[in-house]
Image: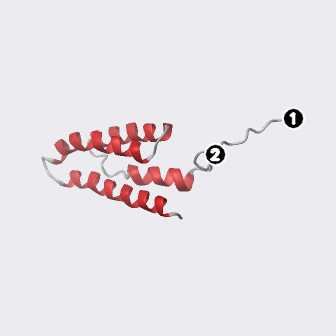
Amino acid sequence: MDKSKNKLLVKGLAYDVVGMTTMAIPVVGPFLDILWAPYAAKTMQEMYPGKKGKVASVILFIEEILPGTDIIPTFTLMWLYTYVWNKDKPGELRPIKVRS
C-alpha cells in the first residue's frame, strides 16, 4: 500500500473519531453536529475528488445531521470502497462486454 493511501486512511479515521465524539457530549453534541456536518462534507469532497466524492459528501452530511447516526464511520467506509471493495482502479475504464 502506498503512503498516500495510508495517509488518507489515517486522516479518515481521525475525522470519524471527531464525528463520533460529538455524540458523547450531552446536550451540546447535537449542536456541534450542525457545525461539523458542513465541514466534514467539504473535507470528504476534497479527499475524494470527482463524482464519488460528491456523493460521499452528501451522504456524510446527511449522516452527521441526523441524530443517532454519528456511529457510522463514513470516512473509513469511503476509503474501503475506494481502495478495497471497488473492482475498478481509480481513473481506469471498465471494458464493455459484448455478447455475440
Report x, y in % for residue 48. 45, 46
Residue beneath the point at 80% across and 36% down: 98
Query: Can you say whether 86 is above or below 14 in the image?
Result: above
- The answer to whether marks 1 and 2 mark residues whose Cβ atoms lie closer than 8 Å is no
Report x, y in % for residue 34. 22, 39
Tell which circle, 1 or 2, labels the residue nearer the N-terminal end.
2
| Label placed on residue 92 | 2
Foreground: disc 1 or disc 2: 2
Report x, y in % for residue 37. 28, 41
What amino acid type should be assigned to the residue bearing mark 2?
Glu
Q: Residues within 10 Å of mark 2 (few under 14, many from 20)?
A: few
Residue at the limit of the structure toward the right, as seen here: 100
Image quadrant in which you'd find residue 14: bottom left
What amino acid type should be assigned to the residue bearing mark 1?
Ser
Q: How is the image coloured?
A: secondary structure
Residue beneath the point at 52% across and 50% down: 82
Report x, y in % for residue 16. 33, 54
Under tag 1, what secondary structure?
loop
Question: Marks 1 and 2, Cα distance to the nearest angstrom?
Answer: 25 Å
Image quadrant in which you'd find residue 44: top left
Under tag 2, what secondary structure?
loop
Image quadrant in which you'd find residue 56: top left
How many marks overall?
A: 2
**Considering depth in this image, is 57 or 43 the residue closer to the camera?**
43
Q: Residues within 10 Å of mark 1 (few under 14, many from 20)?
A: few
Residue 50: in sight, yes or no?
yes
Q: Which residue is mark 1?
A: 100
Residue beneath the point at 44% across and 52% down: 77
Residue at the limit of the structure toward the front, as seen here: 3
Residue 66: in sight, yes or no?
no
Query: Can you say whether 6 is above or below 88 in the image?
Result: below
